[in-house]
Amino acid sequence: MRRTSARQDRGRGRQPPLRPDTAGLRLPLRAAVTSGEQRSRVRVFGLRTRLLLAFLVVAAVSAGTTAALTYREARSALLQTAQDTAVTSFRDHVQQTGFFLPLEREGLEEVLQDIARKGKPHPWVVFAEYGSIRASSGENPVSTVITPELRRAARANPHGSFERVVKDGVPYLTIAMPTVFKAGPDSVLPSGLVLYAVMRMTDEQVNVDALLMAGRDGALPGLAVALIPGLIAARSVLRPVRKLRQAALSMGSGRLDTRIPVRGSDELADLARTFNESAGQLERTVRELREAEERARRFASDVSHELRTPLAGMLAVTEVLDEDADGLDADTARAVRLVSAETGKLAVLVEDLMEISRFDARAAELNADEVDVAEAIRKTLDNRHWTDDRVRVELPDGIRARLDPRRFDVVIANLVGNALRHGGAPVTVSLRTEHLGAEAHSPGTAVLITEVADSGPGIQPAVLPHIFDRFYKADAARTRSAGSGLGLAITLENVKLHGGTIRAGNRPEGGAVFTVEIPLHTEEAGG
């Protein structure tokens, strides 16, 4: 088997809440699933969860806002009604009551008790202040609920004032109404007598608390009921997304004729139409590329087969001419040797093209047998006369593996020849076995590792990703190559046929290194 090496294969170089009672709703959240689980499992923070949470937040904000506004308006209306009734009623009773000055305490208490009995909407306790006289319709002549602010407001406003006060947790409505003398059509004079009405508002507070409880107790069931339209809305949104995901997975597995049913005219329908159009264009493009690739492969295979017969005759003729070249004149001998060398290169190119065609057509077969790996490498080097100081070996004996001898010979020959041609001597070929963990193969799997390292300047970083590409040239100015340009590509295919891997890199001390890893399959004793 002729060693093929190509110059392109190697390039060298180196807002705070409205009230305390309206606490926010807390939802328990489970921990997110780990990245190693299946994609089909429901994610804690997946799109469905986010849609439901968003729907619940909107429903909670809407319900809370509506309940707060309703509560505020109902509370204001309830308190305002009681307040207006009490103030109007007290003012009317005060205006209808006649007082004779100077006042006496005994007669004043009877008047105050009469006014208190007429209290609306709840019973009042009426107090009177006139100079140093203090009287009331109750037991205590002085009220602890009436504030200094209300007294000042009563003196300043002849039409009266009121104030809501909470004393020891009990709400009160306090009303101050001064009595006046009418001095003229539009003027009055204060008499110095001020009457106060104190009314408990416990009934109103009970009604307000009932409103708050009703709003709070109605919000939680409302949120639970809101889950139903939330689930329906999430399902209607996620169904097209799920179909899109399934279609993308189907296309990723090679079914390019996958399409999504389009329903409606919303954004998701537009997305489905766009996906179908893109899928159709991709299918047409891939079909054209496959047809072009198939034509290229068939062309290379046909040309290679057609060239084999005339090349066989040409090689036979050039061998005869080589034998007689010494008897020819210098110019003719030079021309004969040039024709012979170029014919040999053409024969190598045709063989490599046919080999690549077999790989592309998946017609390459692996004829594996148990071999002594070290002995197989020595035979490869001996057959190509690489036994001098240019090639060093580190080949421990006793390593046996199931390999295809011919294809393994091509792998070693291509790597060593490539290192000698584009690297620098000495080239080192080393052999060892290792047990790799689960990251590379199954646990405990033994692999055969073969390394070919040279002493050259190494491989340029820009070249490394393309080192195994077909006909790749590290230097675009080089239009001629001593090989076919397919050497490393064929090496890669042969290694993959063995179920192994090959990688290229640079050694820390300088020089390029190619590492081949092939699963170590040995025959059982007696097998």
Image (cartoon, grey):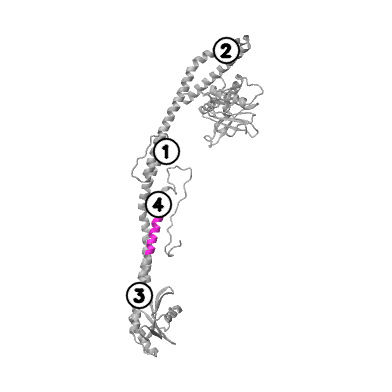
What's the CA distance linking mark 3 and mark 4?
47 Å
**What SS does tag 2 mark?**
helix
Say which residue label 3 marks.
Answer: 84
Say which residue label 4 marks.
Answer: 52
What's the CA distance linking mark 1 and mark 2?
58 Å
Residue at the image position 42 percent from the left and 46 percent from the top: 42
What's the CA distance linking mark 3 and mark 1?
72 Å
Mark 2 or mark 3: which comes first in sequence? Answer: 3
**In terms of depth relative to the viewer, which is nearer, 461 or 215?**
461
Residue 406 image position (x, y, % from top left): 54, 21
Q: What amino acid type should be assigned to the residue bearing mark 4?
A: Leu
Q: What amino acid type should be assigned to the residue bearing mark 1?
A: Leu
Up-down relation of residue 40 to residue 346 (above or below): below
Q: What amino acid type should be assigned to the residue bearing mark 2?
A: Glu
Residue 516 image position (x, y, % from top left): 56, 29
Q: What amino acid type should be assigned to the residue bearing mark 3?
A: Asp
Q: Which residues are magenta?
A: 57-69
Say which residue label 1 marks.
Answer: 249
Mark 3 or mark 1: which comes first in sequence? Answer: 3
Residue 480 inside the magenta-drawn segment: no
Tell me which corner region of the image, top left, top right, bottom left or bottom right, holds residue 14.
top right
Say how many tags the image has.
4
Please tell me how crowded label 4 is: few (under 14), some (14-19), or many (20+) other residues with Cα within 10 Å.
many
Q: Which mark is residue 319?
A: 2
- In this view of the protein, can residue 210 be seen by the observer? no
Residue 490 image position (x, y, % from top left): 53, 25
